[in-house]
Amino acid sequence: MTNSLPTVIKLLAKSLEVSEESITGQTELESLGADSLTVVELIFDLEEEFNIQVGDERPSLVVVQDIADQIDRHLAASGVTP
C-alpha cells in the first residue's frame, strides 16, 4: 500500500458516496462511476490535502492505485510525507 492510498480511497468514497470498504487500490475507477471530471476534482482535493501541485499532468488513470501512485510521486519530488 502506498502512503497516499488511504486518503485517496477516503476522498473518492466521499465524492462518489460509496463505502470506503468497497474500494481497493485495484478498483477500476470506471466501475465506481468515476468520470474524468470526478477524477480531476479528486486530484484538486488531493493537491489541497497534501499541499502539492500536480499541474496539468494527467496520465492514464485506470485504477485507484494509479491516482495514489501519481500523488506519491509528487510527494516524493516535493519531499513531503503523508
Image: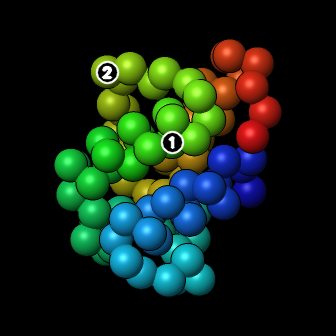
Vertical comparison of 22 with 69: above or below: below
- Amino acid type of the residue that numbered disc 2 sits on in the rendered structure: Asp
Give the CA distance from mark 2 to mark 1.
14 Å
Q: In which quarter of the image is residue 28?
A: bottom left
Q: Which quarter of the image is occupied by the C terminus?
A: top right
Residue shown at the point (72%, 49%) measured from the top left: 2
Give whichever of 1, 16 is nearer the camera: 16
> Would you say 82 lies left or right of 68 here?
right
Would you call the spot at circle 1 few (<14 residues within 10 Å), some (14-19), or many (20 or more)? many
Type of the residue with mark 1: Leu
Residue 39: image x %, image y %? Answer: 32, 49
Q: Please tell me which residue is depicted at 28% across the width and 63% down the height of the picture.
A: 34
Q: Residue 46 carries which label?
A: 1
Q: Which of marks 2 and 1 is nearer the N terminus?
A: 1
Q: Quick check: can you spot residue 73? A: no
Residue visible at 57% across and 41% down in the picture: 49
Above or below: residue 66 compared with residue 81: below
Which residue is at the far top?
A: 78
Q: Can residue 53 be seen in this view?
A: yes
The reply to whether discs 2 and 1 touch (Cβ–Cβ < 8 Å) is: no
User: Badge 2 is on which residue?
Assistant: 56
Q: Residue 14 carries which label?
A: none
Quadrant of the snapshot with the N terminus: bottom right
> Which residue does the image show at 34% across and 71% down from the upper left?
16
Q: Nearer the viewer, mark 2 or mark 1?
A: 1
Give the side of residue 81 with respect to residue 73, left or right: right
Foreground pick, 50 / 31: 50
Crowding at dot 2, Cα within 10 Å, few <14 / some 14-19 / many 20+, comes out as few
Element at badge 1?
Answer: helix
